[in-house]
Image (cartoon, coloured by chain):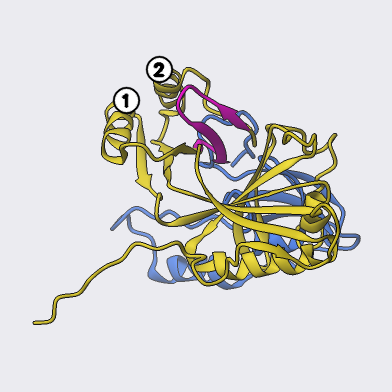
Amino acid sequence: MRIACPFCGERENGEFTYLGDASPKRPNFAVDSGESPGGVEDAFYDYVYLRDNVAGYMREYWYHGGGCRSWLIAERNTVTHEFRSVTAAPGVGAAKPVQAGE
Amino acid sequence: MVDYLWNTQSPLQKALVPGRHGAAGAHAGVTLNEVRDIVLVQVMARRGKAAETGKAAKKLFGVEAPATPKAVIGKTATLIWSGPDQFTVIAPRTDEASQLAAMAQVFAGSASLSDQSDGRCLIRVSGPRGRDAIAKFSSLDLHDLAFPVGAAANTSVDHTAVNLWREANGADGHPVYNMLVFTSFSDSLWHTIVDSSLEYGVEAASARAA
């Protein structure tokens, strides 16, 4: 399997580390805004533990530790391992035009 | 209290055995050099300051800092891309303190500098079969079309980070590759390169950066 890093070009997958689903967003609660403690807990439980088991295209975090040391967001088909797109994760290389939307 | 004496020595002090190794023949297929006495500085643009860092580099070295994996030759140093908004400056060591001071002055406010002069080891691979030797342990495509003169890459060799770039062909017309590796891994990488080169015959030496 080869992954096309937006900075380095195509490289073998041994240079990359897989983190997982890029879609969970950290819940953002204002302090003392009257949220029920149970609701906050449920939202964090979901964020930390619950994952979808997608059969098909999935947005994932990958880390190019063996190369440019950038965090990337890849759209990968979990059935065929086809990569549809690989872009820089937000915050990587401020000057880069190609950034995955968040 | 015991007084300690600190002697500076090459990380390849033991591994590098100068001379001819491996296959005999009129000409060695691979020429291996440890390039000593370098000044090496990692330049990382601060958040949102990539353009200013580029201008500072232009002011000091007379060339644009590489924004893609390339090595560009400036007035007094070579600038090698090492990641988004990052590059490594490499120069022969003349007066290290003033070389570093000049950089600190011009990049003040736009980039963070990190002196890596004694942290990395530079190994140069050349000769008619140099590329074949590298192909045994690197997954990069080093064909002329994919990796021409001036190309650079951050890659892994045996799980070890290596900055690899290609400079102008040698006097023999064959490609010349530079590999920058952490000093503590240089011994291991050196043995890997020598082992890969033995079947072609290898000439090993160390040289001062020029």
State the residue at coordinates (63%, 65%).
B189
- From the top left corner, tell me how far across and down residue A49 is, in percent: 58, 73
Please provide the residue range marked out in magenta: B71-86
**Label 1 and label 2 in one chain:** yes
Choose between A37 and A65: the one closer to the eye. A65
* Residue A23 visible in the shown view: no
- From the top left corner, tell me how far across and down residue B139 is, in percent: 78, 56
Pointer 1: residues within 10 angstroms few (<14), some, or many (20+)?
some
Give the residue furthest to the right.
A80
Total number of numbered labels? 2
Which residue was labeled with disc 1? B106
* Residue B156 visible in the shown view: yes
Q: Chain of mark 2?
A: B
Choose between B37 and B101: the one closer to the eye. B37
| Residue B59: numbered disc | 2
- From the top left corner, tell me how far across and down residue B178 is, in percent: 63, 46
Indicate the quadrant where residue A100 lies. Answer: top right
Most common secondary structure along the magenta stretch: strand
Amino acid under disc 1:
Val
Secondary element under disc 1, as helix, strand or loop, is helix
